[in-house]
Image (cartoon, helix red, strand yellow):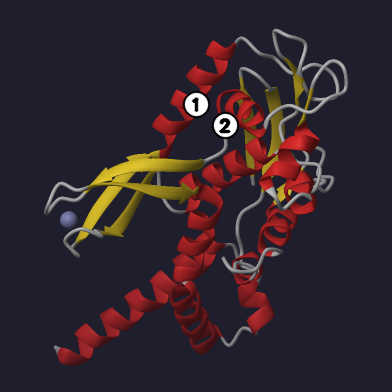
């Protein structure tokens, strides 16, 4: 279990407990299932008291930063990925440190001078209001125009333009959905690539499914434990048991070879 303290100069602090991933949680990971995010958060994230988190009411900013913390703990501090160059057809690698992106976002947010008031809204210089979206807002308003209309408002009760709402939120409540400028190592072509921490984390965990099955097979073969028992092991413990079993096999192999 990890005590998580998230903060942004514009939004203040938010505390959570982030549980260890176990096999049951890893089996919930399906990047193409819209319900995968609430299910995964429901299984690993709680309030500091241990009470369940209201995922629909969770700010998207905190959702993304929870995923960043999960990614950093389970998969590493660096995002390393491959892109396919549209100009020359070659594959090239790109990557960045998540911590550096978070820090740059904190600096940009502080520079806005905005700070949420009660009810979770920002009040702009001309009295207009903008509210950072929750997970529930995104589910309710699939269309970006409808979402902007729900999040922004003028002092007289009118609507704010979508451009203005998005511009305020990009700086004051930034998500980890980034347009990255990458450069092909082969031909120097510059390409904008969309990076999304939630999708990237889910895809990275889903890509490890063969490893989960292999570790389960090793442990079941060696100890005879049932599937549920093995799935209830934390990811770290499961990996440690599988490592020991593999070590034993290697030692046995060496002895019989000698
Ligand atoms: Zn290229």
Is residue 232 at least partly visible in the picture?
Answer: yes
Task: Report x, y in % for residue 241.
Answer: 47, 70
Q: Which residue is mark 2?
A: 174
Side (left or right) of 39 relative to 78? right
Between 20 and 77, which is closer to the camera in this rendering?
A: 77
Task: Report x, y in % for residue 92.
Answer: 21, 56
Mark found first going from the N terminus, 2 or 1: 1
Question: Quarter of the image holding residue 232?
Answer: bottom right
In the image, residue 253 sits, relative to residue 31, either above or below, namely below
Between 175 and 37, which is closer to the camera in this rendering?
A: 175
Task: Report x, y in % for residue 69.
Answer: 54, 42
Residue 105 tag number = 1
C-beta proximity under 8 Å, tags 2 and 1: yes
Q: Secondary structure at mark 2?
A: loop
Ligand 1 found in image quarter: bottom left
Graded by Cα atoms within 10 Å as few (under 14), some (14 to 19) or many (20 or more), the crowding at tag 1 reads many
Residue 233 tag number = none
Between 235 and 201, which is closer to the camera in this rendering?
A: 201
Q: CA distance from mark 2 to mark 1?
A: 7 Å
Q: Secondary structure at mark 1?
A: helix
Extreme residue in the bottom direction:
256
């Amino acid at each position: 279990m990890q005590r998580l303290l998230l903060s942004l100069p514009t939004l203040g602090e938010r505390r959570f407990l982030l549980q260890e991933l176990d096999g049951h949680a890893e089996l919930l990971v399906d990047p193409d299932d819209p319900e995968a995010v609430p299910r995964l958060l429901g299984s690993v994230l709680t309030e500091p008291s241990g009470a369940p988190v209201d995922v629909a009411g969770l700010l998207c900013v905190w959702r993304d930063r929870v995923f960043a913390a999960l990614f950093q703990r389970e998969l590493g501090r660096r995002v390393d990925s491959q892109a396919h160059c549209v100009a020359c057809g070659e594959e090239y690698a790109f990557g960045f440190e998540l911590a550096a992106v978070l820090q740059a976002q904190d600096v940009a947010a502080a520079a806005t001078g905005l700070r949420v008031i009660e009810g979770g809204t920002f009040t702009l210089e001309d009295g207009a209001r903008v509210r950072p979206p929750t997970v529930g807002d995104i589910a309710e308003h699939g269309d970006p125009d409808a979402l902007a209309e729900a999040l922004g408002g003028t002092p007289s009760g009118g609507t704010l333009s979508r451009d203005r709402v998005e511009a305020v939120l990009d700086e004051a409540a930034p998500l980890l959905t980034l347009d990255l400028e990458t450069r092909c190592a082969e031909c120097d072509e510059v390409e904008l690539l969309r990076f999304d921490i939630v999708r990237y984390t889910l895809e990275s965990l889903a890509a490890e499914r063969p490893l989960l099955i292999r570790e389960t097979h090793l442990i079941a073969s060696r100890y005879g434990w049932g599937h549920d028992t093995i799935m209830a092991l934390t990811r770290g413990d499961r990996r440690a048991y599988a490592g020991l079993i593999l070590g034993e096999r290697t030692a046995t192999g060496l002895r019989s070879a000698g």
